[in-house]
Amino acid sequence: MKKLLPIPSFLAFLCSFVSALSTQPPGPAGPTNITVILVKADQFTTFNKLLKSVQQSDQINNQLNNSNQGQGLTLFTPPDNAFANLKPGTLNSLSDQQKVQLVQFHVLPNFVSMSQFHSVSNPLRTQAGNSNARQFPLNVTTSGSQVNFTTSVVDAVVANTNYTDGQLVVYHVTS
């Protein structure tokens, strides 16, 4: 015959067990996935398709989930309506290499928070080119909490932050 714990002893055991469970650190959140992040943001379908079509989503995920990477990434994401304003067939007329460069131009190879834009040196280096050689220059200016970008093609503003985890920051940009 099994001996049962008295109710007060059982309650004390149960309380200590629940307390121990609640102090355990949470399990890993899983690897960062840029595709999932952009799907949840729900306004970057075209950019997300472009990322996937040239395997840059895989490249970004690998960079983020490589424990040796350490510097993080900054991604500037134009919304679907920015692509809708392009002449029909513009994206389809680009070669795969041009599509890769277009995506890489929207990625900084390090994590840059909104407050850090106030002290960055222009031009910023994107993954598309070398800022020292003046390839694909990206210049930033700030005014209060507003962050503006100028390129040889377009001027843009950071509308808001869609995602940040200290390793990756995804900004919604508008022109």
Image: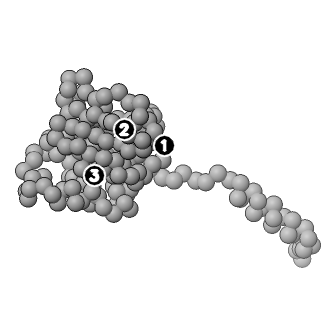
Of 26 and 165, the residue lying toward us: 165
| Amino acid under disc 3 | Thr
Q: CA distance from mark 2 to mark 1?
A: 21 Å
Amino acid type, mark 2: Thr
Q: How is the image coloured?
A: one colour
Residue drawn at point x = 8 percent, y = 56 percent? 87
Query: Where is residue 129 drawn, in percent x and y?
Result: 22, 31
Determine whether 28 is above or below 150 in the image.
below
Indicate the position of residue 64 as horizontal and vertical percent values.
40, 42
Secondary structure of residue under mark 3: strand
Residue 104 visible in image:
no
Q: Earlier in the sequence, mark 2 or mark 1?
A: 2
| Disc 2 element | strand
Is residue 45 shown left or right of residue 14? left
73 left or right, relative to 150: right
Nearer to the camera, 22 or 87: 87
Crowding near the residue tagged with mark 1, few <14, some 14–19, many ≥20 C-alpha atoms within 10 Å: few
Labels 3 and 1: the sequence-earlier one: 1
Check disc 3 and report the residue beneath it: 174
Residue designated by label 2: 142
Q: Nearer the viewer, mark 2 or mark 1?
A: 2
Q: Earlier in the sequence, mark 2 or mark 3?
A: 2
Point out which mark residue 23 bears.
none
- Asked if the residue at tag 1 contacts the one at tag 2, i.e. Cβ–Cβ closer than 8 Å, the answer is no
Q: Position of residue 95 (x, y in %)?
A: 10, 45
Kindly identify the residue that appears in the image at 31 percent across and 36 percent down: 140
Q: Amino acid under label 1?
A: Gly
The residue carrying mark 1 is: 166
Residue 169: x and y, percent?
Answer: 41, 46
Quarter of the view holding residue 111: top left
